[in-house]
Amino acid sequence: MSNVLNEVLLANREYANSFDKGDLPMPPGRRFAILTCMDARLDPAKYAGLSEGDAHVIRNAGGRASDDAIRSLVISYKLLGTREWFVIHHTDCGMETFTNEIMGDLLSSSLKTASVDADGWHDSCEGPGCTDGKYINWLTIKDQAQSVTEDVMRIRNNPLVPSDIPIYGYIYDVKDGKLIEVPEATAAGRA
Ligand SMILES: [Zn+2]
C-alpha cells in the first residue's frame, strides 16, 4: 500500500474515533459559499473559520468561475439555501505561470508531469501525447484582482444567479494568511 494511502486511512481512523457530527443537516448552517483555488497552501476551513456543516467550499485550479463552478453555486443556493458567496483567489497562484498556449504545447508532446525552471515549463520526456485531445480553456490568470473581478462578474451575469445574492471578491495572501478585498469585484457583485 502506498504511504499516502496508509497515512490518509490512519488519519481518517483517528478523525472518526472522535466524530460527533453525524446529525448535521445537508444545507450549510451559515448559508454561504466560497469559490477558491485548490492550492495546497490554502485551507478555507482555517482562513475563513469553518466547521463541518457551515458552508459550501467549491475548489478548482485558480478558484475560477468555470461553468462547473457556477453549476455548483446554483445548486448551492437553489437547493441548499446559501445566501452569500465569496470568490477568493490568492497571491503566487500557479495559474499565473502559464497560458493556454503553453499548456496545449506541453500536453501535445507528453502526458507526463512537466517541470519548470527559469526558462519556463519543460516536458520531462519526449513522445506522442494527446494531440487529438479537445481544447480546454485553462482559465489561466494574468492579474489576480482582474481575475477575481472577472469571475465575480461572470457569476453575477449568469441568468440563473439571483440578483439578491451578494458576491464578495477577495485575494488570499499566502505569505501572511490575510484576505484582501478586491473592491471593484465586491462592487460588481453587490446584491
Ligand atoms: Zn492557485
Image (spheres, rainbow, N blue to C red):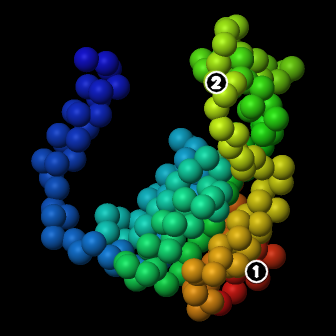
Task: Please indicate, yes or no, whether residue 49 appears anywhere in the rendered image.
Answer: no
Residue 157 in the image, given as x and y percentages of width and height:
70, 78
For mark 2, give the secondary structure.
loop
Identify the image quadrant of residue 120. Answer: top right
List the single residue furthest toward the left. 17
- Give the residue drawn at x 37%, y 78%: 80
Q: Position of residue 100 (x, y in %)?
A: 78, 40
Earlier-in-chain disc, 2 versus 1:
2
Residue 50 visible, this orientation: yes
**Amino acid at circle 1:** Ala
Label 2 within 8 A of ligand 1 by Cβ: no
Q: Is residue 44 or residue 133 the one in the foreground? A: 133
Compared with 108, 188 (above or below) is below
- Quick one: 2 or 176, which is closer to the camera? 2
- Residue 89's label in the rendered image is none
Q: Which residue is pictured at 44% across the width and 59% down the height?
A: 45
Counting the numbered discs, the total is: 2
**Where residue 49 sits: x, y (%)?**
45, 66
Numbered tag placed on residue 130 in the rendering: 2
**Image quarter hosting the N terminus:** top left
Circle 2: residue type = Cys
Between circles 2 and 1, the one closer to the viewer is 2
Compared with 160, 178 (above or below) is: above
Indicate the secondary structure of the residue bearing disc 1: helix
Q: Which residue lies furthest to the top in this view?
A: 126
Looking at the picture, how far across and down is residue 137, in whole percent? 71, 47
Q: Which mark is residue 188?
A: 1
